[in-house]
């Protein structure tokens, strides 16, 4: 290939290293106001009263909002989160009030003058405590929340979702085991720490429409959730995403966008900007969920896994957000890539009084696969078997059944071949090398798989336009958050249409009014899925080019070649026409025109999916 797979300069590199790249924090709109949040000092407390009278006296304060102003719940899968805390707070850092002022300094001054009276409540800070029958309830109204039918919040508990898989006869499996090993595993919540903190601007217009400028991974998801939560038709919501300074999952869902939109309405329809400080990012932005796992495994002396009993509990914090789907994904793939004939698996998403959890690289797999693989090492040591041999003996191979009873297909990959290849490459079996009196260099191996838990209609789309000078404009919905996807997509276009990468521009912003639909920038899906959409769009454009060129050159399409920015007849390169001369239709010397603007369209939706 001429372009794909070749090392090239990233197409967004110049703008980023020179400071010309425009991020949401760089935007200044006419008449813009600035918001500052008052955050809860308690993990769990009733709100008795909020006094904003002194703050309103500060010159330059335009308005102040509390939870009573916005009786709307939002949520990705469970509508459990108020835009500002109402009646009670559920973690240290939950927004309680928002000041809108002419400048940021005034907003900061006014926030300090707001007085809130709290009645502290017992917090629940460990998922094991949260699961006890007498635990304080984080959400007393859990049974009232609207939620996706795929999830099962349990009223009267702290369980936002419960996912259970059962297979075979677990009692029989443990009875046939020679050795039974049981372990517990813990992992705390983790902050994403993107280089760019959360920032968004909202403007509520008098015609009932909303404009948003935000640092986000998934503009179409924001539009949908905002429309659903506020009862606004989607065509009245515009979401604009400029350059984004990192996301890692923390900007995948909806965050502060509803707040700035409603603050704008309360402030007289002027645009309102909210930008978190680094301290606020740690306190009030979402995090990776915490994790607790308990795994009981029964094996024979010759290394066969006979049974597993698994409990995973994900610490969702104060609100469910992506957490319920993370728990579900972990439930599907709870065993890791191993065959377990007898299984009881339970994956819980649990409310606590921690910051609310959301997507983070790996979508829960990082946590539970660490637990599975750590125990594989422990069990192998217990029975005196080499860890690689133990994994190979229990590898889930095509034809065997997964935790949900589905037979693994031949095209799903071969974990045994992967393990053998890695073991060979790293020289498995050679002894550790002593580096110093306190250090050795040793080798370890782990086997992983992933169930991304995406909906079957998680689509991607692309539009390609051929410009009048032969350059190309590519528009896609994937958000560039540092992963380099847009550069790779430009390389795909270059390969398909034989145009140099430097003559291809990928539109550097995402705008739900203008950009083709893309489900979300999550799950490591975008180069594959957006890439397939781009290939189809490029081939659609190519067909249009060849249709016109065939008439101009009076040659069947099958005898034409696109190369070096022109179309020519096979074996007769002198019979050619430049792409630029076809971009808006070809004009004959007598003035007659054939064809029209070249606009390629492509989309991709996953196929050959296994429904679990």
Image (cartoon, helix red, strand yellow):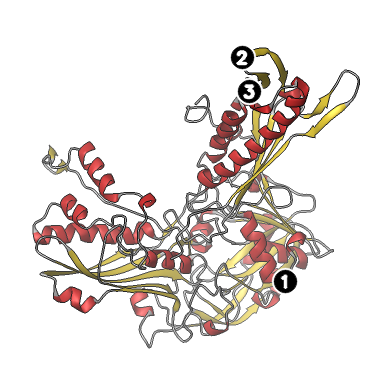
Q: Label 2: state its secondary structure.
A: loop
Q: Is residue 477 above or below residue 433?
A: below
Mark toward the start of the polypeptide (1 vs 2): 1
Are the residues at dot 1 and dot 2 in contact (C-beta closer than 8 Å)?
no
Disc 3 from disc 1: Cα separation:
52 Å
Q: Which mark is residue 401?
A: none
Question: Who's the residue at 73% across and 62% down the image?
Answer: 234
Q: Nearer the viewer, mark 1 or mark 2?
A: 2
> Label 1: few (<14), some or many (≥20) within 10 Å?
few
531 and 76: which is toward the camera: 531
| Cα–Cα gap, marks 2 and 3 | 10 Å
Image: 167 above or below 365? below
* Quadrant where the C terminus is found in the figure: bottom left
Name the one closer to the observer, 487 or 245.
Answer: 487
Name the spot of residue 1 as percent of width and height, x first: 49, 26
Q: Residue at x 71, y 22 (%)?
A: 555
Mark 3 lies on residue: 561
Q: Residue at x 47, y 52 (%)?
A: 193
Q: Look at mark 2 in the image and give the residue it sits on.
A: 571
| Tag 3 secondary structure | strand
Q: Is residue 377 shown to the viewer in this render?
A: yes
* Residue that badge 1 annotates: 231
237 with respect to 427 (left or right): right
- Decide which of tag 3 and tag 1 comes sooner along the chain: 1
Report x, y in % for residue 354.
Answer: 44, 70
Q: Position of residue 225 (x, y in %)?
A: 64, 65
């Amino acid at each position: 290939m001429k372009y794909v797979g070749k090392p090239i300069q990233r197409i967004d590199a110049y703008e980023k290293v020179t400071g010309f790249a425009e991020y949401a924090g760089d935007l200044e709109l006419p008449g813009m106001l600035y918001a500052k949040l008052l955050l809860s000092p308690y993990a769990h407390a009733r709100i008795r009263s909020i006094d904003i009278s002194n703050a309103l006296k500060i010159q330059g304060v335009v308005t102040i909002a509390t939870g009573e102003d916005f009786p709307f719940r939002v949520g990705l899968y469970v509508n459990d989160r108020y835009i500002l805390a109402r009646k009670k707070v559920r973690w240290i850092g939950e927004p309680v009030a928002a000041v809108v002022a002419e400048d940021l300094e005034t907003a900061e001054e006014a926030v300090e003058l707001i007085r809130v009276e709290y009645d502290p409540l017992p917090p629940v800070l460990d998922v094991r405590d949260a699961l006890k029958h007498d635990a304080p309830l984080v959400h007393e109204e859990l049974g009232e929340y609207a939620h996706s039918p795929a999830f099962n919040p349990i009223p009267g508990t702290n369980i936002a979702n419960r996912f259970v898989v059962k297979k075979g006869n677990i009692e029989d499996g443990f009875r046939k085991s020679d050795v039974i090993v049981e372990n517990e595993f813990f992992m705390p919540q983790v902050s994403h720490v993107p280089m760019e903190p959360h920032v968004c601007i909202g403007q509520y217009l008098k015609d009932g429409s909303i404009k948003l400028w935000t640092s986000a991974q998934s503009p179409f998801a924001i539009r949908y959730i905002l429309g659903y939560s506020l009862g606004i038709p989607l065509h009245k919501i515009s979401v604009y995403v400029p350059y984004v300074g990192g996301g890692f999952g923390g900007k995948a869902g909806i965050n502060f966008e509803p707040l700035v939109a409603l603050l704008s309405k309360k402030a007289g329809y002027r645009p309102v900007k909210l930008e978190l400080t680094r301290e606020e990012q740690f306190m009030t932005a979402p995090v990776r969920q915490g994790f607790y796992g308990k795994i009981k495994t029964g094996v024979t002396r010759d290394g066969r896994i006979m049974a597993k009993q698994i409990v995973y509990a994900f610490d969702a914090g104060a609100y469910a957000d992506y957490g319920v789907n993370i728990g579900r994904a972990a439930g599907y793939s709870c065993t890791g890539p191993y065959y377990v004939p007898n299984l009881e698996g339970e994956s819980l998403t649990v409310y606590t009084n921690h910051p609310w959890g959301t997507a983070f690289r790996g979508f829960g797999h990082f946590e539970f696969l660490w637990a599975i693989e750590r125990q594989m090492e422990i069990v192998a040591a217990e029975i005196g078997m080499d860890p690689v041999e133990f994994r190979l003996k229990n590898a889930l191979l095509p034809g065997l059944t997964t935790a949900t009873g589905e037979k693994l297909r031949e095209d799903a990959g071969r974990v045994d071949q992967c393990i053998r290849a890695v073991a060979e490459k790293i020289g498995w079996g050679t002894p550790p090398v002593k580096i110093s009196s306190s250090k050795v260099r040793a080798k370890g191996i782990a086997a992983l798989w992933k169930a991304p838990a995406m909906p079957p209609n998680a689509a991607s789309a692309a539009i390609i336009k051929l410009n009048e000078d032969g350059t190309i404009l590519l528009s896609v919905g994937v958000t560039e958050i540092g992963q380099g996807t847009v550069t790779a997509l430009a390389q795909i276009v270059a390969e398909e249409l034989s145009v140099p990468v430097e003559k291809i521009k990928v539109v550097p912003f995402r705008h739900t009014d203008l950009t083709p639909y893309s489900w979300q920038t999550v799950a490591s899906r975008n180069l594959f899925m957006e890439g397939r959409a781009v290939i189809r769009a490029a081939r659609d454009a190519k067909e249009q080019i060849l249709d016109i060129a065939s008439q101009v050159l009076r040659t069947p399409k099958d005898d034409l070649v696109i190369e070096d920015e022109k179309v020519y007849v096979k074996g007769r390169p002198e019979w050619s026409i430049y792409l630029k001369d076809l971009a808006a239709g070809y004009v004959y010397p007598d003035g007659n025109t054939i064809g029209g603007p070249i606009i390629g369209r492509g989309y991709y939706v996953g196929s050959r999916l296994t429904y679990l």
